[in-house]
Every structure is written in C-alpha cells, then in structure tokens.
Image (cartoon, rainbow, N blue to C red):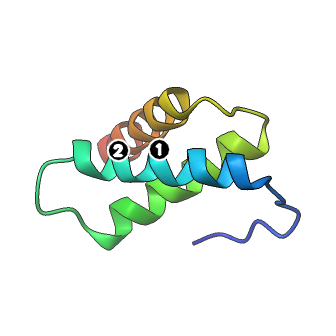
Amino acid sequence: MRDFPDAVFAPETVAAMREALEASVSALPHPVTAGQVNLLAESILRTAQAGERDTAILQRMALLELQLTQRV
C-alpha cells in the first residue's frame, strides 16, 4: 500500500472509510485477492483525503477505480 503520510481523519471519517471498504469487498466476486483489497483501500484513502465523506461515494469510486485498473 502507498504511503499517506499527511493523512489525518476524524473518527467519523475513519468509520465511513471502514464501512466503504467492507461494502466494496463484499461487492466483489470471490475469491477476493489481497491486491484488490489494497487497491480499494488506497482509492478510499485518496478520495477521503480529497474531502469526500459519503460512504456510498467512497465505495463507488473505489469499485470504479478497481474496475479501470483491472482493464489496463
């Protein structure tokens, strides 16, 4: 996973990010790889760091980025 050295999040944001990650992983077909989970987590961190706090949007962005990454 990439470093996010300047990332500081309020507890509510961490909870939203956790919920988005769990929902994203649950939406994937099995088996889910560690690489997929890392890409989802990085996307959620990056999107939250940009100011997004909505769990559904965090999840949607992560899944879209994963889909685009896997096509390349």
> Vertical placement of 34 versus 37: above or below?
below
Quick check: 21 left or right of 13?
left
Residue to which mark 1 is pinned: 20
In x, y percent, where is residue 3?
72, 71
Marks 1/2: CA–CA distance: 5 Å
Label 1 crowd (10 A; few <14 / some 14-19 / many >=20): many
Quick check: 67 left or right of 41?
left
- Element marked by disc 2: helix
Q: Residue flagged by tag 1: what amino acid is it?
A: Ala
**Picture residue at 84% right of the left edge, 60% below the top:** 8
**Picture residue at 25% right of the left edge, 49% below the top:** 26
In x, y percent, where is residue 30?
11, 57
Q: What residue occupies the far front of the structure in this picture? A: 12
In x, y percent, where is residue 51?
79, 34
Say which of 23 and 35 sits in front.
23
Residue to which mark 2 is pinned: 23
Label 2 crowd (10 A; few <14 / some 14-19 / many >=20): some
Q: Are marks 1 and 2 in contact (CB under 8 Å)?
A: yes
Say which of 58 and 13 sits in front.
13
> Vertical placement of 4 versus 70: above or below?
below
Quick check: 29 left or right of 38?
left
